[in-house]
Image (cartoon, rainbow, N blue to C red):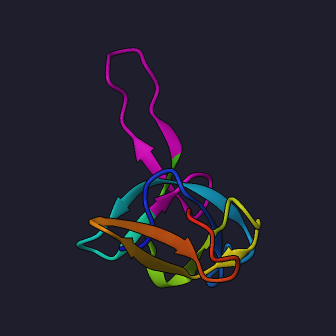
């Protein structure tokens, strides 16, 4: 998986197309990610204690990795990610500006 937790991404497909957000969690086995403030689902939460009211909360749902693109911190564009191996170190690079991410 070429995308990591903390990366800024652009959504390129789905109901939130065009929005950007930060990755909260990457799920490599499922091929998905959770993005802050995007693809929100409503969930009813029961009251924890007596006298407290239940509520409806918005939580981010899993978005498939194929529907997002990384935003390069150097050039600020939505880009594909490549790898460059120098010695025994493997670095992610931007396919447009060829800079290290």
Foreground: 20 or 50?
Answer: 20
**Residue for point 48% across, 85% down:** 66
Q: Residue at x 62, y 69 (%)?
A: 99
Say which quarter of the image contains residue 54: top left
Q: Name which quarter of the figure residue 61 lies in.
A: bottom left
> Is 17 positioned to the left or the right of 35 in the image?
right
- Can residue 61 be seen in this snapshot? no
Q: Position of residue 13 (x, y in %)?
A: 63, 84
Instruction: Tell me if residue 77 can be seen.
Output: yes
- Residue 79 x/y as whole percent: 64, 79
Q: Residue at x 64, y 74 (%)?
A: 11
Residue 56 colored in magenta in the image:
yes
Q: Quadrant of the N terminus?
A: bottom left
Q: Magenta stretch?
A: 34-57
Residue depicted at 33% across the width and 76% down the height = 31
Report the front residue among 85 and 18.
85
The verdict on residue 12 being magenta is: no
Q: Quadrant of the C terminus?
A: bottom right
Name the quadrant containing residue 100.
bottom right
């Amino acid at each position: 998986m070429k995308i990591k937790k903390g990366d800024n991404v652009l959504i390129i497909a789905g109901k939130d197309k065009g929005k950007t957000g930060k990755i909260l969690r990457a799920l490599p086995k499922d091929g998905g990610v959770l993005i802050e403030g995007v693809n929100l689902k409503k969930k009813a939460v029961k009251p924890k204690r007596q006298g407290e009211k239940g509520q409806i909360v918005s939580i981010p749902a899993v978005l498939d990795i194929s529907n997002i693109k990384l935003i390069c911190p150097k050039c600020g564009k939505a880009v594909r990610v490549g790898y460059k191996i120098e010695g025994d170190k493997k670095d992610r690079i931007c396919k447009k500006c060829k800079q290290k991410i």
